[in-house]
Amino acid sequence: MTLRVPAWTLAVAAMLSVQFGAALSTRLFVDVGPAGTAWLRLTFGALVFLLAGRPKIAGMTWRDWRTPIALGIATGVLTVAFLSSIDRIPLGTAVAIEFLGPLSVAVVRSSDRRTLVWPALALAGVLLLTEPWQGAVDPLGVGFACLSGLSWATYIVLTQKVGDRFAGLDGLSITIPVAAVTAAVVGVPQAWGHLSWTVLAASFGLALLLPVIPFSLELLALRRLTTAAFGTLMALEPGIGLVIGLVLLSQVPEPLQVVGVILVVTAGVGAERTGQRGAPDTHELTVPPGAA
């Protein structure tokens, strides 16, 4: 049945799940804060992956453990930083700033200096989105989004190594629990004393939207899409974030901000099309677990 569904629809469905999850997560901010929401989402996601994946850890050495642990830490920081950013700035803006991380990785991996035009184009788009000349930019919100982008870039590099070492869901079954523990450092103090059955039920549902459902869909899509095709589809993420922010959060963008998102999306498509490495790489410009 799955093979009858076009692979690109799986990738788009994954992105929609990520952005819906991000937008709906904001409704928990009043109760448990953005860090508390990140912690709860990752914790429930970790439980699902542990039950489904049941990682085979017997015989693993420290050399085997260190990369998935580092990836889990990066994922935890990514999730907390991104949710903290959308608590302060519009969803579309946060996604566009965050996307500078994987875009930079794609450009750095290219040997063609002409690809430097893409981060410059994306930066121009981000400036149109944040409009610093208006004096209304939230520096802390932008800072959180930048930290999220840096974590996303780190995720891409580490995910390749984990993907080479672990099969199936084994890698996620290790990294997501580590991410949950990482997020707990700041998430537990925010959420403690505000937990209720309603909050827990909502958090479980959000964990299904991200990371459980999108990661499952991405695994299926990556088996049938080339790296260029998948990476190009992922470049649509800032645009999807803008639309979801408009529909669910009533975040109406200014005309210049729409142009800014178009520039970021164009930069992402261009970087992916011109910045491919010779060896196959199924994780380039991949959406990270617990992000956005």
Image: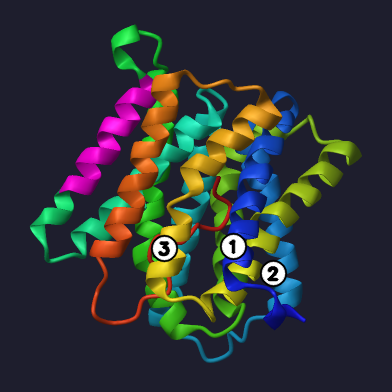
Check if mark 3's residue and mark 1's residue have beta carbons within 8 Å.
no
The quarter of the picture where residue 1 lies is: bottom right
Work out how far the residue at label 3 is from the one at label 1, CA to CA, in angstroms: 23 Å
Height in image: 27 above or below 215? above
Q: Going 66% across and 22% down the picture, which residue do you hit?
A: 250
Query: Is residue 188 visible to us here?
Result: no
The local secondary structure at tag 3 comes to helix
Quadrant of the drawing holding the C terminus:
top right
The stretch of residues the image draws in magenta is 117-130
Residue 156 falls in image quadrant: bottom left
Asked if the residue under mark 2 is in contact with the one under mark 1, i.e. CB atoms within 8 Å, the reply is yes
226 left or right of 217 in image? left
Which circle, 3 or 2, is nearer the viewer?
3
Q: Please, what secondary structure does the residue beneath circle 1 have?
A: helix
Q: How far apart are marks 1 and 2 (CA)?
A: 8 Å
Q: Mark 3 points at which residue?
A: 231
Q: Name the residue type under label 1.
A: Ile
The residue singled out by tag 2 in the image is 49
In magenta segment, residue 124: yes
Q: Choose the circle earlier in sequence order: 1 or 2.
A: 2
Pointer 3 with pointer 2, Cβ within 8 A: no
Q: Mark 1 points at which residue?
A: 176
Q: Is residue 109 magenta?
A: no
Disc 3 or disc 1, which is closer to the eye? 3
Q: Quadrant of residue 258?
A: top left
